[in-house]
């Protein structure tokens, strides 16, 4: 009953001071919002960079053309290996690796830039000759149709799987394949009106109605291939499949002039076997090459090289979080201290009219609680909305609502709110009423 | 109703201490109407704060309605204040963010008295004070006389036996002063004990007894 009275008084108190309360709440809202959004961005940047740089699993081993030099401290200097060197890796090497014990799969990749042609439209694309494991290794899902099979590889079947951008471009939904997918969804799906009108005038309305190329024939370098599948948009920056056309490596060797592999991804049967497989793969290729013009890079070496970047990003996240908390905390503190100071006389009046210290404190406690709750909820809501809007419109990297940041922001808000809202109120409530009444 | 014996009160000011009350003795019977006069700074408000249990005396004894205030706990004093005392302060002391109605309602919110029909009681009082048309206004929209009526309504709402008024007519014109004094007369007739502090001899003469605070003692 007494608690309820305190709660009721708090509601009155908040309502009767609504303009001051609103500014206090703004402090809480902005504080929460800042912490959530800034950490979400920091985490988003960190995650995206991490994912981009380490999209391979820990049990995967990369075989690259050219020799990756060792740096002074024994780490592989990845930059030297990532530059373009003429490749001497062949499909034979890949087959040789297949026989190495504990190798689960080998995914060779032949890559070249070509023009794909459909219905008078020419689209520049990356042609990738590879194995049936490719979509799994690249974490690329199919949005339509299916990926090619081992059997189709052996038959040198003339089948292709299109990357998302290539598919759209060949359908005429996109003029040219863009480097990265900067444009938003609806821009890709609806043609501008002038374009539709133009299509009508030119009698090309039929193409506008086509929504899928699965089952259709696409021409590449005067050879025709049947489209059997389309990959869903794949946002992993470093190895996006969106501008690729995938075909069985056997077909690629037979119908194009591609010969040397750009890279191979070797999957070890288990993480424990990675070290052993790493050495065995190296030896298997060395046996077929006259010199060491290739590199075998384990994922942990890759990650080791990235360790520094990771720790920089971690520091950035930490710094941003602390700064955001500091700024929001200071804001909330100011607002709280101000509003209690302004209300010292009010506390004196209430006490003169017979309020006990605990009744006053109950009111201020609930006021602070309500203020932080409402402000916190609005702040989280706004933060969430921001993240949603961001994710729907900006595709460079995705933001995730970090639960720990939400909790951290809530705790700080409550902590600072009670410290600077309740403590001065307690001081005022403990004051002799005669003194509180004199307070200006 | 009130019994002060050899009450002393001093304030620490900087290095030394200033003794404001130097042995005040006062006995007020229930239902009495007493005026206290004295120069500015003589300690009238200080004494009223002691009487209203808003401040503590430094030595002596104080009994209010048969209870020893100087021995009471904080919480008990708050209850006593709520139930027995109605204040009319020197500067109105209305809460600026609450409406007239809410200001008057406040003592009922804290009271343990289970008064029924709190709302109608407040409204009836506002009506009696002639300010029921202002019940939803904020205090800063009111004239001095109206504010004082709100303050008096708030002092009366809990039906206290003791009314303490500090310069209730200090900033009001003659006509308003007269109407406020009439209100006091009415409250007095209804049986309340009133102690009023004033500079104005005409106001003081409405009381049954006039006391002067001089050099820290009542004469
Ligand atoms: N809380 C306090 N701390 C220190 N000194 C105080 C305090 N309250 C009052 N005084 C001092 O005590 C003296 C008496 O103050 P008080 O307010 O009781 O005078 P007063 O008789 O009510 O005067 P006025 O007629 O102007 O209202 C003054 O000198 C004042 O400065
Ligand atoms: Mg005074």
Image: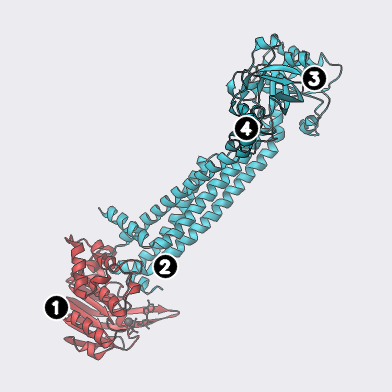
Chain colours: A cyan, B red
Compared to residue A262, the image places residue B106 above or below, namely: below
Establish whether labels 2 and 1 are both on one chain.
no
Q: Quadrant of residue B19?
A: bottom left
Few, some or many C-alpha atoms within 10 Å of disc 4 (few <14, some 14-19, many ≥20)? few
- In the picture of the structure, the residue carrying the numbered disc 3 is A260
Q: CA distance from mark 4 to mark 1?
A: 101 Å
Q: Residue furthest bottom?
A: B201
Circle 4 or circle 1, nearest the eye? 4
C-beta proximity under 8 Å, tags 1 and 3 = no
In what quadrant does ligand 1 lie? bottom left
Few, some or many C-alpha atoms within 10 Å of disc 3 (few <14, some 14-19, many ≥20)? some
Q: Earlier in the sequence, mark 4 or mark 2?
A: 4
Q: Is mark 3 within 8 Å of ligand 1?
A: no
Q: CA distance from mark 4 to mark 2?
A: 71 Å
- In the picture of the structure, the residue carrying the numbered disc 4 is A200
Q: Earlier in the sequence, mark 4 or mark 3?
A: 4
- In the picture of the structure, the residue carrying the numbered disc 2 is A342
Compared to residue A410, the image places residue B29 above or below, namely: below
Circle 1 or circle 3, nearest the eye? 3
Subunit under mark 1? B
- In the picture of the structure, the residue carrying the numbered disc 1 is B31
C-beta proximity under 8 Å, tags 4 and 2 = no
Pick whichever, A41 or A213, lies toward us: A213
Q: Is residue A347 left or right of residue A107?
A: left
Circle 2 or circle 1, nearest the eye? 2
Q: Residue furthest right?
A: A290
């Amino acid at each position: 009953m007494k608690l309820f009275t305190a709660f009721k008084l708090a509601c009155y108190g908040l309502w009767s001071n609504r303009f001051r309360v609103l500014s206090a709440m703004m402090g809480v809202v902005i504080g929460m919002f800042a912490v959530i959004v800034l950490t979400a961005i920091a985490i988003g940047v960190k995650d995206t960079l991490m994912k981009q740089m380490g999209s391979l699993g820990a049990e995967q081993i990369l075989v690259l053309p050219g020799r990756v030099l060792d740096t002074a401290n024994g780490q592989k200097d990845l930059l030297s290996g990532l530059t373009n060197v003429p490749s001497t890796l062949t499909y034979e090497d890949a087959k040789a690796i297949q026989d190495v014990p504990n190798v689960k799969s080998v995914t060779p990749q032949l890559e070249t830039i070509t023009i794909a042609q459909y219905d008078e439209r020419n689209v520049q694309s990356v042609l990738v000759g590879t194995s049936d494991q490719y979509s799994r290794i690249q974490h690329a899902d199919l949005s339509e149709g299916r990926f090619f099979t081992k059997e189709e590889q052996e038959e040198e079947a003339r089948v292709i799987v299109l990357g998302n951008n290539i598919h759209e471009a060949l359908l005429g939904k996109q003029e040219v394949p863009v480097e990265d997918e900067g444009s938003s969804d609806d821009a890709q799906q609806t043609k501008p009106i002038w374009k539709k009108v133009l299509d009508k005038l030119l009698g090309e309305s039929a193409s506008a109605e086509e929504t899928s190329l699965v089952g259709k024939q696409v021409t590449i370098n005067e050879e025709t291939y049947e489209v059997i599948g389309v990959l869903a948009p794949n946002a992993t920056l470093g190895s996006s499949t969106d501008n690729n056309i995938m075909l069985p490596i056997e077909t690629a060797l037979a119908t194009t002039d591609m010969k040397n592999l750009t890279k191979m991804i070797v999957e070890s049967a288990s993480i424990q076997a990675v070290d052993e497989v790493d050495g065995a793969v190296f030896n298997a290729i060395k046996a077929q090459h006259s010199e060491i013009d290739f590199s075998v890079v384990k994922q942990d070496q890759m990650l080791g090289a990235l360790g520094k970047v990771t720790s920089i990003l971690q520091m950035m996240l930490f710094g941003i979080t602390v700064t955001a908390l500091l700024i929001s905390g200071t804001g909330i503190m100011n607002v709280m201290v101000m509003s209690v100071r302004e209300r010292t006389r009010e506390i004196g009046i209430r006490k003169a009219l017979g309020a006990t210290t605990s009744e006053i404190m109950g009111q201020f406690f609930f006021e602070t609680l309500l203020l932080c709750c409402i402000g916190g909820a609005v702040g989280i809501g706004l933060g969430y909305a921001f993240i949603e809007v961001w994710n729907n419109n900006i595709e460079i990297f995705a933001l995730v609502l970090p639960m720990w940041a939400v909790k951290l922001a809530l705790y700080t808000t409550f902590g600072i709110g009670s410290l600077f809202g309740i403590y001065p109120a307690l001081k005022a409530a403990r004051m002799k009423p005669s003194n509180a009444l004199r307070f200006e | 109703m009130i019994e002060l014996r050899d009450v002393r009160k001093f304030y620490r000011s900087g290095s030394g201490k200033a003794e404001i009350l130097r042995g005040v003795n006062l006995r007020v019977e229930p239902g009495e109407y007493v005026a206290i006069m004295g120069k500015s700074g003589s300690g009238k408000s200080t004494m009223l704060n002691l009487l209203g249990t808003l401040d503590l005396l430094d030595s002596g004894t104080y009994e209010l309605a048969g209870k020893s205030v100087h021995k009471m706990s904080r919480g008990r004093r708050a209850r006593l204040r709520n139930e027995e005392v109605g204040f009319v302060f020197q500067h109105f002391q209305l809460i600026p963010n609450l409406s007239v109605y809410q200001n008057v309602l406040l003592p009922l919110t804290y009271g343990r008295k289970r008064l029924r029909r709190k709302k109608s009681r407040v409204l009836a009082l506002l009506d009696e004070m002639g300010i029921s048309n202002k019940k939803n206004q904020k205090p800063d929209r009111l004239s001095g006389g109206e504010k004082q009526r709100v303050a008096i309504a708030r002092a009366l709402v809990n039906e206290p036996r003791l009314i303490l008024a500090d310069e209730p007519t200090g900033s009001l014109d003659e006509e308003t002063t007269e109407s406020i004094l009439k209100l006091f007369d009415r409250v007095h007739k209804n049986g309340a004990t009133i102690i009023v502090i004033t500079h104005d001899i005409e106001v003081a003469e409405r009381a049954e007894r006039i006391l002067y605070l001089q050099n820290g003692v009542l004469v």
